[in-house]
């Protein structure tokens, strides 16, 4: 097993920008996204439909098709640039070093081929021709995900939804890749199957040491599994930091709103409000902060100044409330707004102890 | 069985539950002539829904919850059993007028707001058509006024303007509100809502759930809320019914069922709900089983293969619902024997 500490990042994404050329104008679905993924790291990417999370993932895996196109930035996987690779060069990397688990296993699996035949295809494409090796490895990966190898002879329709998703994950494990990209692999499953699949993914990761980028709309799903969490809004990173930190003390009003939108099965039954309004049309994004029209803490500056990603301790957050420029956040936010601890930013800013007296009174 | 329904319960007087089912079953024939088999989608379900009450029907996919909604909406004919609405057996409503009257009082809101509204017609079409069909006494102007009233109730404002829009101009959350407005225009007693929020984004869901609670509190409508999301069920429902493999496993006041679940399956379901506020032990033993497809079932508890507490009795007989606390019932031999059930 690789030692996760001694190596550099598996994946480096820098300023990645993806645009769709539409009749009504250019839609920038992913806007200047940068992050690293370390070996064996689990990164969760959450956001609402249309926030660009799936486009980001397709861009990393080089699966975009027109009218979507990478118009800026770089994706570096294991030290080599992925943008602009030919199909043949990509084919050598796919499945072997980087694999993708799609949302709908029913559509991703070939309905007229048995599971075993599809495993065989993937292995032969990468030069494994020995029948005993193919059979042995196929049975091994199926066992890893808790499916009896007799199902190598089964066709996708003969398996339940949970088993189909697990066999997709088994297929992604054929060559023990360094990075597995997952696009809502559990969204078609009910809670019980969903949880057992998440636990299984985490166990496999701990055993084999691969990194995961996991896209989902369900923030609570990744809460216990991911190391770092990226919250996306309208094509941009709204907040990115250690998962526990983001859950316990969310800084961006959008993250706070998302977390407060989940009713809990424990504790008192509190009335919740959700987030009013709808995400912006990305062909005509708002001039300032893209969340400003829905934000409960909106200030005048938000409507004019697009916020950058500011560093607040271990977290990056795109919100003027956390800007080091005091002029931008000096307007009085509405009373009762809890912004969490931003001491590290405030200390770096000029005379900045503005936000420190606000306690983190989130419920 | 329809000989003397009036003698079966005290609810014919109008003081009983709004809707009650008795031994409701729906079996589907599958296979070909050589291997004819029966899929028991819903088996022997008896439930009731009171006035101004939100009842959540929860369970895994394939547990029969949508089949129950379709049975109650008269989209399916029951294989056996009876539905009583305001004390009257629904199977007796055979004429078109009776059926229209019933479906107006018990309308349905569907899961997918993108395929349940005709994309080429204005939003007003669906609600006006429902009004014309179910409330023929209204004039055209009255129908429009009523459409505007219900649109305002569900928060689609300005109502007159929204009614003139096309479906693609509305977001998913707004479309689902249209579904509730269409149901509400019929002056319903009970709305059958089949996973009404599962396709919506998290930030929008709460608004719809709040709307459902408001319809109960302000319009006096009962709602059967079908969901696989226990947390949202807790948020709005008064009572919770948990289904497993076509049968009711447990039912009771929602807080009681969640605080002290009696059936091992309910416990499994609750343990699987992701809760960011609770610590998680990844190494904890979790259930890896799958819900059964109930084809030609043999007697015995349908959960026994996944149940760590199963005893001999569970393999021999099918447990029936038994009240263990006031209003709180479960179909589990172990719980009924008075033992402490702690399966998951």
Image (cartoon, coloured by chain):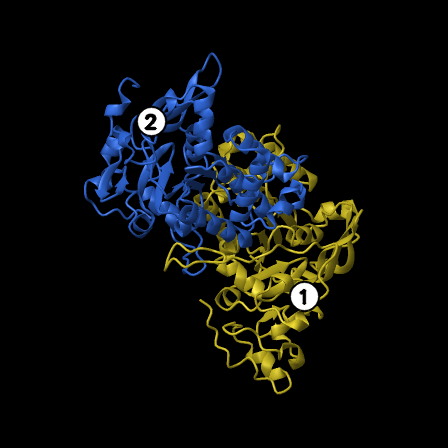
Chain colours: A yellow, B blue
Task: Residue A351: give x, y in percent of width and height.
Answer: 61, 87
Label 2 sits on a secondary structure element that is strand
- A156 relative to B290 in the view: left or right: right
Badge 1: chain ID:
A
Tell me the distance, in whole angstroms, between the alpha carbons under discs 2 and 1.
58 Å
Q: Against B25, is B275 above or below?
A: below
Of the 4 image quadrants, the one containing the N terminus of chain B is top left
What residue is rendered at 67% in x and 61% in y?
A: A236
Give the farthest residue toward the left.
B338
Answer with the quarter of the image where residue A65 lies. Answer: top right
> Are marks 2 and 1 in one subunit?
no
What residue is rendered at 61% in x and 74% in y?
A: A322
What residue is rendered at 22% in x and 48% in y?
A: B340
- The residue under label 2 is B88
- The residue under label 1 is A289
Q: Nearer the viewer, residue B152 or A113?
A: B152
Task: Residue B74: give x, y in percent of width and height.
Answer: 44, 26
- B60 relative to B301 in the view: left or right: right
């Amino acid at each position: 097993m690789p030692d996760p500490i001694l190596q550099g990042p598996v994946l480096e994404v820098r300023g990645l920008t993806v645009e769709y050329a539409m009749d009504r104008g250019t839609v920038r679905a992913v806007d200047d996204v940068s992050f690293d993924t370390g070996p064996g790291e689990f990164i969760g990417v959450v956001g609402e439909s249309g926030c660009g999370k799936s486009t980001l993932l397709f861009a990393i895996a080089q699966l975009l098709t027109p009218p979507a196109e990478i118009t800026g930035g770089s994706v570096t996987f294991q030290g080599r640039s992925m943008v602009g690779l030919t199909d043949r060069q990509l084919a050598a990397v796919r499945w072997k070093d980087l694999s993708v688990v799609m949302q709908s296993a029913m559509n991703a699996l070939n309905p007229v081929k048995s599971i075993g035949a599809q495993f065989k295809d993937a292995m032969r494409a990468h030069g494994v021709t020995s029948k005993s090796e193919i059979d042995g490895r196929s049975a091994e990966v199926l066992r890893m995900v808790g499916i009896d190898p007799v199902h190598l002879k089964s066709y996708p329709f003969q398996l339940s939804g949970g088993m189909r998703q697990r066999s997709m994950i088994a297929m992604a494990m054929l060559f023990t890749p360094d990075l597995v990209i997952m696009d809502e692999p559990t969204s078609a499953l009910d809670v019980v199957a969903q949880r057992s699949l998440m636990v299984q993914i985490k166990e496999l990761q701990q055993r084999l040491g691969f990194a995961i980028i996991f896209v989902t709309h369900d923030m609570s799903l990744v809460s216990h599994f991911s190391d770092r969490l990226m919250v996306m809004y309208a094509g941009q990173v709204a907040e990115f930091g250690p998962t526990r930190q983001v859950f316990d003390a969310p800084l961006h009003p959008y993250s706070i709103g998302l977390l407060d939108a989940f009713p809990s099965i424990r504790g008192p039954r509190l009335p919740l409000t959700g987030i009013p309004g709808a995400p912006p049309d990305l062909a005509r994004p708002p001039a300032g902060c893209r969340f400003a029209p829905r934000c409960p803490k909106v200030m005048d500056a938000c409507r004019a100044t697009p916020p950058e990603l500011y560093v607040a301790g271990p977290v990056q957050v795109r919100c003027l409330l956390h800007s080091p420029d005091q002029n931008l956040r000096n307007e009085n936010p509405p009373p009762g707004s809890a912004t969490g601890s931003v001491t590290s930013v405030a200390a770096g800013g000029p005379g900045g102890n503005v936000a420190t007296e606000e306690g983190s009174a989130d419920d | 069985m329809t000989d003397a329904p009036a003698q079966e319960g005290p609810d014919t007087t109008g003081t009983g539950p709004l809707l009650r089912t008795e031994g409701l079953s729906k079996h589907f024939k599958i296979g070909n002539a050589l291997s004819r088999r029966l899929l028991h989608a819903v088996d022997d379900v008896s439930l009731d829904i009171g006035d101004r009450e939100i009842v959540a029907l929860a369970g895994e996919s394939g547990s029969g919850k949508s089949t129950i909604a379709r049975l109650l909406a008269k989209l399916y004919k029951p294989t056996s059993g009876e539905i009583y609405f305001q004390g009257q057996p629904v199977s007796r409503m055979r004429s078109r007028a009776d059926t229209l009257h019933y479906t107006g009082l018990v309308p349905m809101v569907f899961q997918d707001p993108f395929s349940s509204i005709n994309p080429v017609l204005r939003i007003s079409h669906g609600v006006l058509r429902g009004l014309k069909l179910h409330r023929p006494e209204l004039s055209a102007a009255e129908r429009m006024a009523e459409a505007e009233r219900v649109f305002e109730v569900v928060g689609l404002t300005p109502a007159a303007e929204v009614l003139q829009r096309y479906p693609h101009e509305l977001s998913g959350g707004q479309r689902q509100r249209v579904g509730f407005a269409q149901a509400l225009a019929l002056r319903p007693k009970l709305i059958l809502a089949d996973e009404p929020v599962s396709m919506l984004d998290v930030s929008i869901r709460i608004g719809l759930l709040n709307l459902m609670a408001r319809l109960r509190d302000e319009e006096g409508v009962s709602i059967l809320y079908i969901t696989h999301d226990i947390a949202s069920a807790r948020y709005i429902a008064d009572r919770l019914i948990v289904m497993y493999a076509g049968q009711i496993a447990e039912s009771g006041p929602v807080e009681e069922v969640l605080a002290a679940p009696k059936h091992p399956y309910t416990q499994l379901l609750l343990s699987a709900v992701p809760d960011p506020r609770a610590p998680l032990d990844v190494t904890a033993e979790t259930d890896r089983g799958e819900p059964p497809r109930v084809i030609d079932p043999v007697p015995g508890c349908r959960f026994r293969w996944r149940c760590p507490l199963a005893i001999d009795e569970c393999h021999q007989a099918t447990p029936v619902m038994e009240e263990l606390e006031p209003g709180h019932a479960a179909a589990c031999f172990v719980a009924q024997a008075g033992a402490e059930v702690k399966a998951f």
